[in-house]
Amino acid sequence: MSLVSELQWEIGEDFHDKLVEGIYSDASRIAQKAVLKEDGKKHFNIDAAIDKVVTSRVFGFPIMLLLLATVLWVTITGANYPSAMLNNLLIGMGYPFLKELAVTISLPWWLTGFLVDGIYLAMAWVIAVMLPPMAIFFPLFTLLEDFGYLPRVAFNLDRIFSKAGAHGKQALTMTMGFGCNAAGVVATRIIDSPRERLIAIITNNFALCNGRWPTQILIGTIFIGALVPPYLSGLVSAASVVGIALLGILFTFIISWMLSNTVLKGKVSTFTLELPPYRPPRFWKTVYTSLIDRTFIVLWRAIVFAAPAGAVIWLVSNIYIGENSIAVNLIDFLDGFGFLIGLNGVILLAYILAIPANEIVIPTILMLTAMIYGGTGVGAGDGVMFEFDSQMATADLLHAGGWTLLTGLNLMIFSLLHNPCSTTIYTIYKETKSAKWTTVASLLPLVVGIMVTFVIAQVWRIFTG
Amino acid sequence: MINPVLALSLFFLVLGVVLLLFWPEKGLFWKFAGTLVSNEKTLMEDVLKQIYHMEHEGNAGSVLSLKGSIDISEEKLVKVIAGMESKGLIRTNGIKISLRKEGSDYAVKIIRAHRLWEKYLADKTGVDKRQWHHLAELAEHKLTKEQVDDLALSLGDPRYDPHGDPIPTSKGDMQYMQHVSLPLFPVDKKGYIVHIEDEPESVYEQIIANNLQVGAQIIVIEANERRIRFTSEGEEVVLTPIVANNISVAEQSHSGVFKINTRRLTGLKLGEKSNIVGLSRECRGANRRRLLDLGFIPGTEVETCLSSPLGNPRAYLVKGASIALRKEQSDLVLIEMNNDKAYGN
């Protein structure tokens, strides 16, 4: 050992430099002998020309926004039909079929409730809402990646992210988060600097994911869109949803800055970004791998987590302690705190029950509200999640449940700022291998959300009396 | 229902108290935790280190001069010195205090721990260089000899700390480099920054603000009592003599000399080409390895090929690959000064 340190002393500190230098000079000598250079010059010029445009001061940002808007628009409109079809198939037809089947083979009511109303319905909901947008969004995104455009986005935006102590590539993982936070967290593997990668993981939840867009759109339409004359309501409710998504981006920057200047400042930080040459995307291969790697893996995890959630939702609504079901007891218990932050016990319980999947928040809220306020005739029974076909009916039920504009607004904000779903939490743990960072990533958004909604609720009450 | 005004005031009160306590570095909690650390052992080690530095600079230690550099009451200082004397670490002669062999060895051990910890922070963590000194001041009192030796081994037995100070070996040997302070260095001669003093903080801050680094090639243009004008890696810098005094310069750097005049890659305009001379010493640890792996090695041709819309980062063409670097990084890549080739023809 002493010989080793003596030698190390003699070699000096920059022997690693010398080693790399040696390897490179060897490699270039070999390459010169073995590789015939094609006329690569011309090909490169095309790349340079594309680069000049997509990173130019004038066109750089507009092109980026246009592409992002196109991808989101194609995803949202394109997903409508398959979503409706899946909904019709799994919930409209599959659900009654299973109920009848249960009757035919004379299952006890509680087993039917547990299996069909609980587990099956939750899984069906998650698949119907989640699968189509993901199956469109991820392949589109991967095509852009394969073409070579995405590194240029990171290149364009790096200055802005570096101000918050983050990496330009976080722009990509954040965008991926708009599709699914779990996929966004996996995507942070492209950031090879430990500090910036953790920042990207912890803040990914501030990107409004596909499971939360429907909640935003529904509540935005019912509560915000209803404030203005009907001919403006579409525009205003869309603006409110976009506003929430932008608020999420704002929080991404604020929290990134805070993390990089406090708990993470000792972590190693490097920056590398290679701008690879452009190439025509390999369409089918890309579609196939993005479906397998991103869509189905995430979907599978979501189903695995949604099934027990469905079971729990059914159980708490149907097991009674004293006169009331567990759900009612919990709602009574949570009502006080819910009121304090401008929400109510139903919403909080729904968010606790729906930790596995944001997709089932609205159905759970509706079911619980109907259970408590709706009386008979609404919904399909305790513990059976449902959605209305018309937004009017939803609005009526929520107003009957005592919802105000404040409840709607704070629900939209809380939907943005709360703990990640369990799929994402599990993914964060797998990626970081650290219980500490997983806890931070799970609780930080929740604490922020509670603080923001609390302040809004108090200010609201001061001004409205 | 709780009164919203009351609830809101209570919330901001609690938030304020938490921020006041735990605000990074300046929070009261951290300050309080800091005072707990300075116990008798810490104090004694600080005093030992100070006497050692004074003797090294050729000054004799005394209670008065020590009080000037260590922030404690005279009464406490006298007590600490008495304790040290009874332990056989120092001897006093009138007002003069000098180190015995044991005391000197002890001081060198602490200095070794301090400088190794700074080296560790520089190479293996992302801690900002403004904090290295402060953190090493805390760590030096806690590390055992075994821990220090393990640290040295894992860092590859480094010879110099990031400020350019020699790190004592486990036997206590130190290799000081011949150097003079910047104002005394001859004009128009090529030299290298070999040491930057990190105390006092305000002066160090100015040096950092001017982007001066250990290992940087400098040429003094003008030196008088009012200002020192010089180029560092091709950039012109003007400092007051007081600030310049904290920079030491030698004709040779820790890792030899560059035959050619160098400047920073940041100065290479869009479309221009040059050859890489090397990486600055300031480029350390993971960052250095990464740049080397990407092909930023001496002798390689480099061309600035693209600038992002906001001007930073920029992309450079190295060995046929287009690599984006932030300004902080391209500042650390040194290229040839005079051998610019025009783009195209």
Image: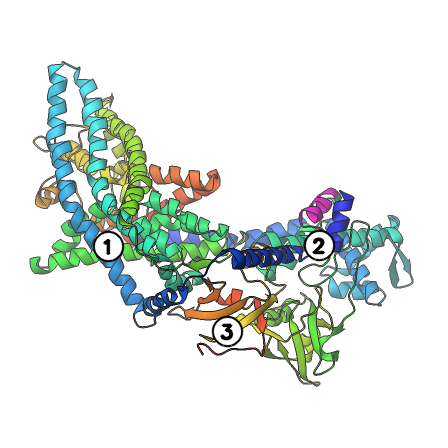
How far across and down, in percent of the image, does residue B117 sit?
A: 67, 52
Give the chain of mark 2.
B
| 3D distance between C-alphas at marks 3 and 2 | 35 Å
Residue type, label 3: Lys
Check disc 3 and report its element: helix, strand or loop.
strand
Observer able to see residue B294: no
Residue to which mark 3 is pinned: B273
| 3D distance between C-alphas at marks 2 and 1 | 52 Å
Question: Do the CB atoms of the residues marked 2 and 1 lie less than 8 Å apart?
Answer: no
| Boundaries of the magenta span | B146-155
Residue type, label 1: Val
Which quarter of the rendering shows the C terminus of chain A? bottom left
Residue type, label 2: Pro
Which quarter of the rendering shows the N terminus of chain A? top right
How far across and down, in percent of the image, does residue A459 sit?
A: 28, 55
Give the label on residue A71, or none: 1
| 3D distance between C-alphas at marks 3 and 1 | 39 Å
Give the chain of mark 1.
A
Residue to which mark 2 is pinned: B158
Side (left or right) of A388 relative to B133? left
Check disc 2 and report its element: helix, strand or loop.
loop
Observer able to see residue A56: yes
